[in-house]
Image (spheres, rainbow, N blue to C red):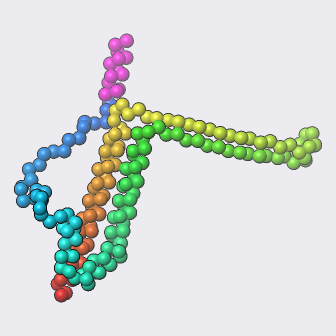
Amino acid sequence: MSRYFLISCALLSGCVVGPRYSQPATDVPAKFASKAEGTVSAEVEAEWWRLLHDSQLNGLIRDAEVRNLDLKVAEARLKEARALFRQARFDLYPTVTSEAGYTNTRESKARSISGRAASSELHDLALDASYELDFFGRVRRSIQAARATEEAVDAQRDALLIDLRSEVAINYLLVR
């Protein structure tokens, strides 16, 4: 009896998904810390070129945002990551599926033994429900991973947008 208990414990210990993630502490110099209250807002920082009040530069940056294929790809990847995150969250809840069908068959008189046409109808209805108990944290970990992926893809898209805007502004200012 104790041998089976030890084997069961050994098998179940291999099912644990992993330790809880904790973000490592990093020393950040004060000059890189978040801005204090009363400073320039994040919206102004994101659209810094508007402080120049140059409508031509605004138009160039708007055109670059609309026509840049890399930005469109980044936005599509962000939509995909958000959809995968939503899909991962669905694993928290039971899955219920249903299916219905109807079949009507009719045999010809020539194939019938009695010489009469035979017909049959078949009605089919199926209902299925399943739920995974998250004892070992697989579902929670997959949701955390999907959320982290979404945030990373969002940050990549934002970085691309910043690069695009700054390149257009730099080149415009060099030409001017």
Q: Which residue is more in the foreground, 48 or 111? A: 48
Q: Residue at x 24, y 78 (%)?
A: 168
Q: Which stretch did the figure color magenta?
A: 1-13
Total residue callouts: 0
Taking the image as shown, residue 18 lies to the left or right of residue 90, namely left
Q: Quadrant of residue 48?
A: bottom left
The verdict on residue 154 being magenta is no
Furthest residue to the bottom? 176
Can residue 21 be seen here? The reply is yes
The verdict on residue 2 being magenta is yes
Q: Residue at x 27, y 68 (%)?
A: 161
Taking the image as shown, residue 54 lies to the left or right of residue 112, namely left
Q: Quadrant of residue 53?
A: bottom left
Where is residue 3 shown, x and y percent of the image? Answer: 35, 15
| Quadrant housing the N terminus | top left
Q: Which residue is more in the foreground, 24 or 94? A: 94
* Predominant SS along the magenta part: helix
